[in-house]
Amino acid sequence: DMTLDYIFGYRGFDCRSNLHYLNDGADIVFHAAGAGIVEHLANGNQSFYLEHTDDIICLTVNQHPKFKNIVATGQIGATPAVNVWDASTKQTLSIIKGLHTKGVCAVNFSATGKLLLTVSIDDNHSIAVWRWQDGSKLASASGHTDRILVGEFRPDSDSQFVTVGAKHVKFWNLAGSELVGKKGVMTNAGQGTDDVKMQTMLSIAFGADNVTYTGAMSGDVYVWKENILNRLVPKAHNGPVFAMYTTLRDGLIVTGGKEKPSKDSGAVKLWDQEMKRCRAFQLETGHKIDVVRSVCRAKGKILVGTKESEIIEVGEKNGSTKNLMNGHSEGEMWGLAPHPTKPLFASSMIQRASVGSPARSIAYSQDGDTLAVGLKNGEFMVLVSATMKVWGKKRDRNKSISDL
């Protein structure tokens, strides 16, 4: 019988904050398709949680010491489930379903680890708080008129949480069996006479004394005191701030965004507790623009997930980078070819080469020195395997080359 040994992939193109450290940075957990994946960094061995019935689109880890290695994952589908499972044993601890439809796009545990917040992509953009151990719902509500992207409990609370999304910031309180929400109140934030405009918010982090940080589409970070806008961190990133992570141990905040790599800036930044000073890190991906969708931090390391479905580990001390995964970005994989003699394989995007048109088929030469790639536009080209440089190309037809 065949057994699953390794998954080459990570869903980064349309998810966020879905890549986490476990066991003080010894392991990582993430997802691809319908699989929850736990990878041991020392040897690269993977183990899998395979109890979902459709693609996973969100993931979170319980931060409370009593619930070590407890993971929650939410899936897409008509009646989507949220599965709570043990990353060590892969045992299912709870399955929550019945309220949400279409898909669950965000999950988050409360401070004590006993409660779970879920956010849906249904028409009502519903939110709910559950006692996950017995699957009982404490409260639910319609969250917003437009899509909610992220919901997170305050790190010190079982009753207060924040949701953000399309032109949306809302501060919630769990009061018995009711969810009471307050909209973010816009002010001039010390910028002048006009109130700052609400933007689409993409990420959340927390500070002391009821301070909340939200990352905006513009690259700014909005700083809230309770539900009132207090100040801005202008251009925290040059593009959208897709991810933020609050380190419970020391209060430092990591942000990830869309950024053109430069000497003085980077797509990942580590900030002080008040988000007034930061250090930028280069990812060294070779892309003209880096787009970070997930960040996490543990023991001097920052774990980064990109829109291109790469997983990268950054060392805080010297800024070194280690590529842990090259997955496929958005789109279908059509071509797959094993090397004739080495434990390697080629696909249309795993080892990237820009071929100008979507690839539809791929094959190694008998000696493995070259790769032939058939394209959607009817061309085929030959690449040098070692460098992925184009050796030659020719147009064969007007339609896709589906096999060669």
Image: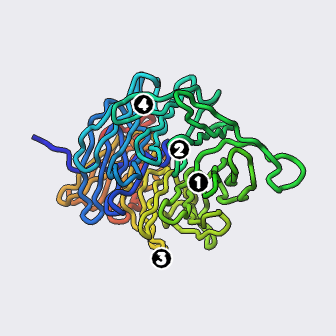
Q: Nearer the viewer, mark 1 or mark 4?
A: 1
Q: Residues within 10 Å of mark 4 (few under 14, many from 20)?
A: many
- Label 2 sits on what residue type? Glu
Q: Nearer the viewer, residue 60 or 182?
A: 182
**Location of residue 314 (image quadrant):** bottom left
Mark 3 and mark 2: Cα distance apart in space: 29 Å
Which residue, as the protein is rendered here, is positioned at the far left? 1
**Location of residue 300 (image quadrant):** bottom left
How many numbered markers are drawn? 4
- Label 1 sits on what residue type? Phe
- Residue at 31 percent across and 34 percent down: it is 94
In the depicted structure, whether residue 8 falls above or below residue 93: below
Mark 3 and mark 1 in contact (Cβ < 8 Å)? Answer: no
Q: Which residue is mark 1?
A: 206
Q: Which residue is mark 3?
A: 317
Q: Which residue is mark 4?
A: 76
User: From this viewpoint, is residue 69 visible?
Assistant: yes
Whole-percent x and y of residue 242? 57, 50
Image quadrant holding the N terminus, namely top left
Q: Nearer the viewer, residue 359 or 112?
A: 112
Q: Horizontally, is 50 left or right of 288 in the view?
A: left
- Residue at 73 percent across and 56 percent down: it is 232
| Badge 1 or badge 2: first in the primary sequence | 2
| Badge 3 or badge 2: first in the primary sequence | 2
Q: Nearer the viewer, mark 1 or mark 3?
A: 1
Whole-percent x and y of residue 268? 55, 62
Numbered disc 1: secondary structure: strand
Q: Nearer the viewer, mark 3 or mark 2?
A: 2
Mark 2 and mark 1 in contact (Cβ < 8 Å)? Answer: yes
Numbered disc 3: secondary structure: loop
| Badge 3 or badge 4: first in the primary sequence | 4
- Label 4 sits on what residue type? Ile
